[in-house]
Image (tube, grey):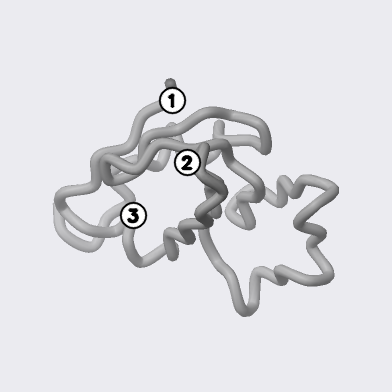
Amino acid sequence: MKGAFVNAEILVSIFCGDMMSIDNAIGEVVFSSIINSYSNDFPKTEWPRSDYNGIMIRQKNGALIFHDMDFFRTEYCPLKKM
């Protein structure tokens, strides 16, 4: 199903504060511009969907990992709530 949103059902159910494993990187969602869910530390005004269309997670060590919407269109996209 290349080009399709293989994780469409779960993408619309991901909110700030959720613990996720995305491409085997585990962290807390700090924003999802896909459904317009932003934490206080990552306001929409500083992380607009026009520039950041996807999901940002923060790992335990503080590292931030942004997954662009194009990533979720790939055929192989491991994604699950923890």
Please state which of the two labelled residues, at mark 1 or mark 3, is closer to the viewer.
1
Residue identified by numbered label 3: 72
The reply to whether callout 2 and callout 3 are in contact (CB within 8 Å) is yes
**Label 2: how many residues lie within 10 Å, few (<14), some (14-19) or many (20+)?**
some
Instruction: Return the mark for residue 11.
Output: 2
Q: Residue 77: where, in percent of width, then height?
A: 24, 47
Q: How would you rate the neighbour count of disc 1 (Cα within 10 Å): few for under 14, some for 14-19, many for 20 or more?
A: some
Query: Would you identify the image quadrant in which residue 28 lies?
Result: top right
Against 62, is 42 above or below?
A: below
Q: Judge left or right: residue 78 versus residue 48.
A: left
Q: Quadrant of residue 4?
A: bottom left
Quadrant of res 2: bottom left
Question: At x 75% / y 49%, what residue is drawn?
Answer: 38
Tell me if label 1 and label 3 are in contact, CB under 8 Å.
no
Whether residue 33 sits left or right of residue 66 in the image: it is right
Circle number at residue 81: 1
- Residue type highlighted by circle 3: Phe
Mark 2 and mark 3: Cα distance apart in space: 9 Å
**Separation (CA) of disc 1 from disc 3:** 15 Å
